[in-house]
Image: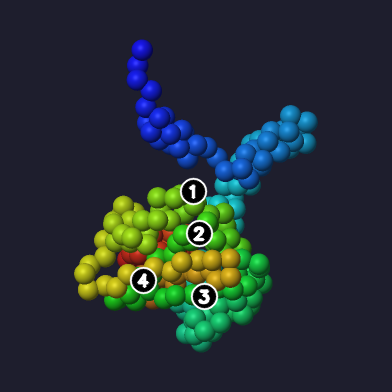
C-alpha cells in the first residue's frame, strides 16, 4: 500500500483550487447558462458584446484621449493635471475614471500599471480588462520584476530608462500616456488614435512604430 503523504496531498489540493474560477465568476457563468437555457439571451451575442467592449469600444475611447493629447498641448497639460476633468470633455467620465491619474512615457521614463490587490482598471476608457492583467502572475511579477514582465510582452527597456510601476486601487487608477510615434506629424487625430493600443495605455507596449 502506498505511503500517504499529507503534505503532498495538501499541495495538490491547493494547486487544483488555485485554478478554479472565482466565486463571482462561477455565479456569472451560472446566471449566463440559466438565461441561455431559457432562451432569453444568445451565447454568440454575449461573446460578440464581450469582444466589442474588450477590443473595440473601450480601447477606442482611451485612444481618442491619447491622440488629442498628442495634438493639443493645452489638453495634454489638463489631462496630466486633472485627468477626470479632461476625460469628461469627451463625456467618458465614469465610476472607474473618477479618480484617475495619467502618467506620461518619455525617452527616459516608462510607466507600467498593475493592480496587486485585485484588478482595478479604468474600464470606461479601456474596456474590459485583459485576462493577463487579472492573473496572479502578472500582479505579483510586475512589482518584483517589471523589466522581465515587459520583455515577455516584447518590450525591451534599456538600463538608462527608468521603469515606474503604478499600483491601481479602487480609489486611484492609472492610465499611461504613450509617446507619439516618430514620423506621425502629418497624421490627423483620427489616424493617430488608430495607432494607439490598449496595451500601450497599460504600459505593456511602448514602441508604437514609425509611420512614413
Quarter in which the C terminus is drawn: bottom left
Q: Position of residue 56 (x, y in %)?
A: 56, 55
Residue 163 occupies which quadrant of the picture? bottom left
Label 4 residue SS: strand
Residue name at image x 46 percent, y 54 percent: 133
Label 3 residue SS: strand
| Label 3 sits on residue | 101
Viewer-side residue, 70 vs 148: 148
| Label 1 sits on residue | 131
Disc 1 to disc 3, how far (Cα)? 23 Å
Q: Earlier in the sequence, mark 1 or mark 2?
A: 2
Q: Earlier in the sequence, mark 3 or mark 4?
A: 3
> How many residues crowd around disc 1 within 10 Å: few (fewer than 14), some, or many (20 or more)?
few
Disc 3 to disc 4, how far (Cα)? 14 Å
| Label 4 sits on residue | 164
> How many residues crowd around disc 3 within 10 Å: few (fewer than 14), some, or many (20 or more)?
many
**Label total for image:** 4
From this view, report whether residue 210 is shown above or below residue 82.
Answer: above
1 and 3 marks in contact (CB < 8 Å): no
Disc 1 to disc 2, how far (Cα)? 15 Å
Q: Position of residue 34 (x, y in %)?
A: 73, 33
Residue 117 has which mark?
Answer: 2
Viewer-side residue, 107 vs 116: 116
Label 1 residue SS: helix
**Numbered disc in front, either 4 or 2:** 2
Q: Earlier in the sequence, mark 2 or mark 3?
A: 3
2 and 3 marks in contact (CB < 8 Å): no
Q: In the figure, is residue 172 to the left or right of 107?
A: right
Q: Earlier in the sequence, mark 1 or mark 3?
A: 3
Amino acid at each position: 500500500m502506498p505511503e500517504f503523504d499529507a503534505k503532498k496531498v495538501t499541495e495538490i489540493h491547493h494547486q487544483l483550487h488555485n485554478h478554479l474560477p472565482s466565486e463571482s465568476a462561477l455565479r456569472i457563468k451560472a446566471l449566463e447558462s440559466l438565461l441561455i437555457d431559457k432562451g432569453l439571451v444568445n451565447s454568440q451575442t454575449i461573446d460578440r458584446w464581450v469582444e466589442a467592449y474588450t477590443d473595440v469600444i473601450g480601447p477606442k475611447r482611451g485612444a481618442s484621449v491619447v491622440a488629442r493629447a498628442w495634438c493639443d498641448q493645452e489638453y495634454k497639460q489638463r489631462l496630466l493635471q486633472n485627468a477626470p476633468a479632461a476625460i469628461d470633455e469627451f463625456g467618458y467620465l465614469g465610476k472607474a475614471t473618477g479618480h484617475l491619474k495619467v502618467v506620461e512615457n518619455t525617452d527616459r521614463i516608462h510607466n507600467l500599471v498593475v493592480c496587486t490587490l485585485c484588478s482595478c482598471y479604468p474600464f470606461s476608457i479601456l474596456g474590459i480588462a485583459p485576462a493577463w492583467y487579472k492573473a496572479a502572475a502578472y500582479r505579483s511579477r510586475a512589482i518584483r520584476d517589471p523589466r522581465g514582465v515587459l520583455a515577455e510582452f516584447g518590450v525591451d527597456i534599456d538600463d538608462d530608462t527608468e521603469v515606474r510601476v503604478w499600483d491601481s486601487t479602487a480609489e486611484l487608477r492609472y492610465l499611461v500616456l504613450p509617446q507619439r510615434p516618430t514620423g506621425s506629424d502629418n497624421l490627423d487625430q483620427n489616424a493617430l488614435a488608430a495607432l494607439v493600443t490598449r496595451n500601450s495605455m497599460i504600459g505593456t507596449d511602448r514602441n508604437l512604430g514609425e509611420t512614413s
